[in-house]
Amino acid sequence: MELLFALGLIAIKIALLIAMLLLLPLPLTWLERKIAGHMQQRMGPMRVGWHGLLQPVADGIKLLTKEDHIPAEADRFLFKLAPILALAPPFVVFVAIPFGESISVLNAEITLYVSNLNVALLFVFAVIGLEVYGVIFGGWAANSKYAVLGSLRTCAQMISYEIPMGFAVVGVVMLAQSMSLVDIVRAQSDLWNIVYQPIGFFVFFVAGLAEAQRIPFDLAEAEGDLGAGFHTEYSGIRFALFMVSEYVVVLLVSVLSVILFFGGWNGALIPLPPLLWFALKVAFFIYVFMWFRFTLPRYRYDQLMAIGWKVLLPLSMANIIITGIAFT
Amino acid sequence: MSRIVDRAGTWIGWALFADLASAFTLTFGYMFSKPVTMQYPDKEKWLPYSRYRGHHFLKRDEEGEIKCVACELCARICPCDCIEVVPYEDENGKRHPAKFEIDTARCLFCGLCEDACPADAIALGQQYEFSSFSSRDLVIGRDDLLGKPGKAMTGGGVVTARLNTEQDVLVEASEPQGYNWWRNIRRT
């Protein structure tokens, strides 16, 4: 009976998580277009619903009903597989992400995470690395030069940015003496990690921008020079899957920044419910992502590589050494 | 000395991402400035200047008689040959057009007909909303031309308006005087 109850609880949590992750891109696209509009003194979507709130729904219906085109020369199996491979890892990662300590519903303590892995951080980085396969397969299978160029860039970018990203969080692990994300947040209840790890956060966030393939590191889908990069040949629902995956990665990097460096659900100054604190911080980081997108230009490819290997990697190494000397 | 200070200043700025910070403050400021978008069909409408060349209209004189004397100079000067005039003589012996048709689908709104007219009878007015689903509807006859709105007296502003698909004019302006659209443009 108890086992059944636990299994049912996990099933409900996973269903809620998937529903949230699938539906969140809708308001995020709306928000992104609104922010883009207002930063350029435009209004953004205005005509569908109140201030264009239903615009993402209209776009979703449009994408679902559009022709699902597969190029004649494409590798059909890989072409169909790629969007799923790009979408699945960011979803799987959220299994290990805690959204809060626990809440009590009907006298039962319910934890706000699906599982508290003791190697959660390792799991997150291992699984998110798999996302690159979707992008590479997508570009390769389409058999188009723009798509292949996009995938090549993604390949190099992911490899050079995952290393500093991994090193940047080592400092956090050293401070918390644990790789469990729940323990890492608990360790920050007095003082957030950003105070001890400013360099670590800087490296992590810049690498996160590259990981999510957002401006200024969106070379994989550079609209200006590659058409749309790896998803040039995709249309309809498969394109929508790539877009959802992109937004989930943005959410993931924001959530990880909050958990690792900004105290997770620990509040400061104003007493608010922990879940609300968490949501507010994540919303701030998502806004920063969009703010960056509509402020900065795109880096050149060699600059991207130079930043990754010559700046971020030494910085993250130095961060580990400084943390090791100062705190252990 | 000042060059050294400048160089040190740029170095410190470079290290602290001063250029990035100024870019972010700029975009953040723009985010809370007023948009310059004119919400044309839904809420607002542009009032053209009086020199605007919109839809043609025919004028009447003080007695309410049509001014046109059907000399066909406008039809002759029209570069795209879109005006067709058929004259007749009324009981007082005056020449007037029995048929005056303008094919606005072919018209390029150059205003030469207005310049050529010896009787000051035809002019290009302020109306700019006359798109149609059929090019046949764009051939406008004499009586319709007499009813078209004339030159704009005020203009160069935005007025509140509402979409009205039943009317001939699709977007009705609800007030005569608008506000200056240029007030929202940020000049630095």
Image (spheres, coloured by chain):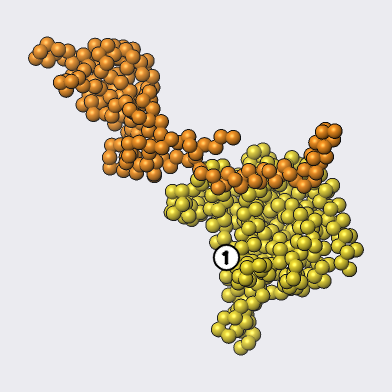
Tell me which residue sits at (65%, 52%) in the image: A289
Q: Chain of mark 1?
A: A
Tell me which residue sits at (87%, 56%) in the image: A318
Give residue A101's quadrant in the image: bottom right
Q: Amino acid at mark 1?
A: Met
Above or below, B143 relative to A56:
above
Above or below, B158 relative to B76:
below
The image position of residue A310, as x and y in percent, is 84, 47
Q: Which residue is mark 1?
A: A20
**Is B100 left, or right, of A177 in this rendering?**
left
Tell me which residue sits at (61%, 59%) in the image: A283
The image position of residue A156, as x and y in percent, is 77, 48
Give residue A227's quadrant in the image: top right
The single residue placed furthest to the front in the displayed view is B1
Q: Is residue B69 visible?
A: yes
The chain coloured orange is B
Tell me which residue sits at (25%, 18%) in the image: B121
Q: Nearer the viewer, residue A102 or A217?
A: A102
Instruction: Identify the secondary structure beneath mark 1.
Output: helix
The chain coloured yellow is A
Q: Nearer the viewer, residue A161 or A87?
A: A161
The image position of residue A80, as x and y in percent, is 62, 54
The image position of residue A238, as x and y in percent, is 58, 53
Q: Quadrant of the C terminus of chain A?
A: bottom right
Q: Residues within 10 Å of mark 1 (few under 14, many from 20)?
A: few
Q: Nearer the viewer, residue A286 or A137?
A: A286
Give residue B116's quadrant in the image: top left
